[in-house]
Image (spheres, coloured by chain):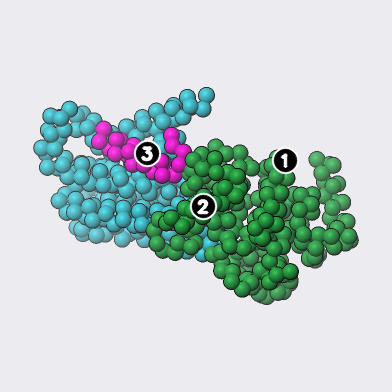
Amino acid sequence: MISYLSEMLSYPFMARALIVGTLVSLCAALLGTSLVLKRYSMIGDGLSHVGFGALAVASALHLAPMAVTIPVVVLAAFVLLRLSESGRLRGDAATAVFSTGALAIGVMAASLGTGMNADLNSYLFGSVLAASREDVAVSAVLSAVVLALYLFFYEKLFAVTFDETFARATGMKTGLFHTLLAVLTAIVVVLGMRMMGALLISSLIIFPALTSMRLFKSYRGVIGGAVVFSLAGFFTGMGISFRYGTPAGAGIVVVDLALFCIGCGIAWVRER
Amino acid sequence: MGEFCIACDRVTLSYENQVVVRDLSFTVSEGDYLCIIGENGTGKTTLMRGLLGLKKPSSGSIVLGPGIRRSQIGYVPQETPVQRDFPASVWEVVLSGCIGERGMRPGFGRKEKKLAQEKLEILGIADLKKKSFRELSGGQRQRVLLARSLCAAKKLILLDEPTVGLDPLATEEFYHLLLDLNRDLGITVVMVSHAIQEALGHSDHILYLSRTGSFFGTTQEYLSSSEAGRFLKRCRGGREKT
C-alpha cells in the first residue's frame, strides 16, 4: 500500500493531480451540501457544460484556459440564478438551455479549431495530465478563498438554506448569499472540470452530500461526512485509475456511487 | 393597554396589477393575541409578508411600534417540503434564530447559546436538543420553529398558518402554548390561522379578511357580528360536506 502510494507520488503529474483533487474535493463537498439541500443540484451540471464550452473556445483561440473559463462560468452562474429567481424561464429549463447550448458551442469550437481529437475527449472526461504547475497554484489560492468564505459565512449559509423567508425576515440579504453560493460553485466547477471532465464534475459536488445526508442527522455532521466521503472517493478513484489506466473522473464517480449505495443500504437497515 | 406594536394605515398590497389586500387599517397593541382569519385567496399570507417587511405596500403604511426593529420580529413560517427532510439538529435550527442579532460576525457567542437554551426550556423541548429536525413529529417541529422565532423576537411573533398538517390535539396544544407565551411573557402574537375554532377560542382580537371587506375588533365583538355568523356557518357547512 505504502509503496503503491509512493510509486503514484513519484510521477510529478500524479502528485499535482492529488494536490488539486484534494482541494477541489474538499470545496465540492462543502458547497454540495448547500446545493443539494437548496434543490440546486443541476446548477453544477449546467455550469460544467458552460465551462466546457468556454474551455473549448479558449483553446481554439489559443487563450489561457483558466483566465477565460472562470469569468465565463461565474457570469453564467449569476445569470442562471437570476433566471430561476425571476421565474421568467423556469430554473430547470434555464439550466437545460445553458448546458446544451454551451456544449454545442464547445463542440463547434473544438472541431473548427483543432479537429475532434484527444483534446476534446480530455475536456469531456477529464485527464490527470491536465494539472499543470500553474493549475496547482491557481487551485490552491482559489480553494483557500472558497474555504475561507464558506467557513466565515457558515451560519448564514445554513440560515439561508434552511429557511430563506425567516432569514429575510430577520434582515439578512439573502440574495447576496445566493450569489456567493453561485460564484463559489462556479469556481469549484472550473477547478475540478479539467481533471474530472465536464460531464462528471457535478457528481463530485452532489454524491458526497447525498451519501452523507443518508447517514448523519445534524447539519455539521452531514458536512463533515460529505468531506470524508468526498476525499475517500477521490483517493480510491485515483488509485483505481492509476492501477488500471482508466480516466480519473470516471473512477472517482464510480467509487462515489458505490459509497452512495452503501450509505443507502445502511440507512435502510437502520430504519428497519 | 400598552403601546402599539404594529399600526397598519390604509394598506393596499398588490401583485403586478392585482390588488390582494385593499385599504386595510388596524392596530396591534402590546400584549395582544391577534388571529387573522378568512377564506383562501383573501390575502392573509400576503398581509403577513407585508408585516414582515418582505413586501412593500403599494399604498398606505405599516409602522412598527417604538423600540421594535425588523430583525426583532420572530417569525414562524408555513412548513416547506425542504425543511421536512432537512438534516439539522434541533439545536442548530433554534440557534439559527439568533442570526439577525449577530450581524456580519461569524459563529455564535456564549450569549446566543444561552438564549437558545433558554427558549428550548421555555417550550419544554430541551430534551430534543440533539435530535434531528426531520425525525420529529409535526407538533414538535412547530415548537422548534417557535423556539427559533423567540430567539429573534423581543416582543412580537408573527405566525403563518403554523398548524397546517397537525392533528387536532397537537393544534390545540400549540394554540395553548402561544396563549401561555402571550400571558406569561407578554409576547404579542399575530397569527394567520385556518383553525377557526382554536383561533376564536384563544385569541383576544380577530382580523377577518374577505373579498367584500374586512372586520377588525376583539374576538367578542367579532363573534356577535354579522360577518362572523355568515363565515362560521360556511365553515361548518364545508366541514359537514367533507
Subunit of label 2: B
Residue highlighted by disc 2: B116
Query: Disc 3 vs disc 2: which is toward the camera?
Result: 2
Q: Amino acid at mark 2?
A: Ala
Which stretch did the figure color magenta?
Answer: A215-236
The quadrant holding residue B228 is bottom right
Whether the magenta-drawn stretch holds residue A234 is answered as yes
Residue highlighted by disc 1: B169
Query: Disc 3 vs disc 1: which is toward the camera?
Result: 1
Instruction: In the rendered view, tell whether residue A194 sits above or below residue A156.
Output: above
Front residue of B17 and B72: B72
Q: What is the secondary structure assignment of the residue under circle 3?
A: helix
Q: Residues within 10 Å of mark 2 (few under 14, many from 20)?
A: many
Q: Is residue B239 something that shows in the picture?
A: yes
The quadrant holding residue B54 is bottom right
- Indicate the colour of chain B: green
Q: Which chain is cyan?
A: A
CB under 8 Å between discs 1 and 2:
no
Q: Amino acid at mark 3?
A: Gly
Q: Position of residue A166 (x, y in %)?
A: 55, 57
Residue highlighted by disc 3: A225
Q: What is the secondary structure assignment of the residue under circle 2?
A: helix
Q: Quadrant of the N terminus of chain B?
A: bottom right
Q: Which numbered tag is attached to residue A153?
A: none
Front residue of A13 and A33: A33
Q: Amino acid at mark 1?
A: Leu
How far apart are labels 3 and 1 at the CA level? 38 Å
Name of the residue lying farthest toward the left: A10
Marks 3, 1 in one chain: no
